[in-house]
Image: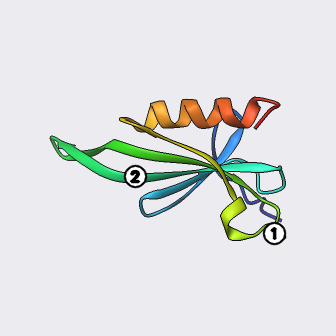
Amino acid sequence: MAENRFFEYKGYPLVRSNDTIYFGNMSDEYVCRLSIISKTKIGNIEIADKVIISKMATADNLPPDKIIIKTSEKTSLYEALDIAYAWLTRKAS
């Protein structure tokens, strides 16, 4: 039986849908959502130049206004992933 595998960054899965990337394990207490807000075209490649990171609780019993724990904005996808990784690996929210 084939095992479902996701792309990973530093051991955490990445799941993309258009310009939204979810980073982390849904079975953990938190995941991060990276929303690509704008891109710059360099040659034939589009590079994200504005990304909003949201640390989100995965508990399904929380009211909508309590799901997003914190947010930040970065100017590259790499910077956004780096912040998201730090948020997921820190003990405090």
Dividing the image into 4 quarters, which one contains the C terminus? top right
Amino acid type, residue under disc 2 in the picture: Ile
Q: Secondary structure at mark 1?
A: loop
User: Dot 2: within a 10 Å radius of its alpha carbon, few (fewer than 14), some, or many (20 or more) residues?
Assistant: many
Amino acid type, residue under disc 1 in the picture: Asp
Residue 76 sits in which quadrant?
top left
Q: Nearer the viewer, residue 86 or 70?
A: 70
Residue 74 sits in which quadrant?
top left
Q: Nearer the viewer, mark 2 or mark 1?
A: 1
Residue 18 percent across, percent down from the top left? 43, 64
The mark that comes first in sequence, 2 or 1, is 2
Q: Residue at x 29, y 51 (%)?
A: 38
User: Dot 1: within a 10 Å radius of its alpha carbon, few (fewer than 14), some, or many (20 or more) residues?
Assistant: few
| Left or right, 38 with reference to 58 | left
Q: Nearer the viewer, residue 13 or 54?
A: 54
Read off the residue under disc 1.
Answer: 60
Residue sitting farthest toward the left: 43
| Left or right, 21 with reference to 41 | right
**Position above or below: 89 against 28:** above
Q: Residue at x 81, y 69 (%)?
A: 60
Residue sitting farthest toward the front: 65
Read off the residue under disc 2.
Answer: 36
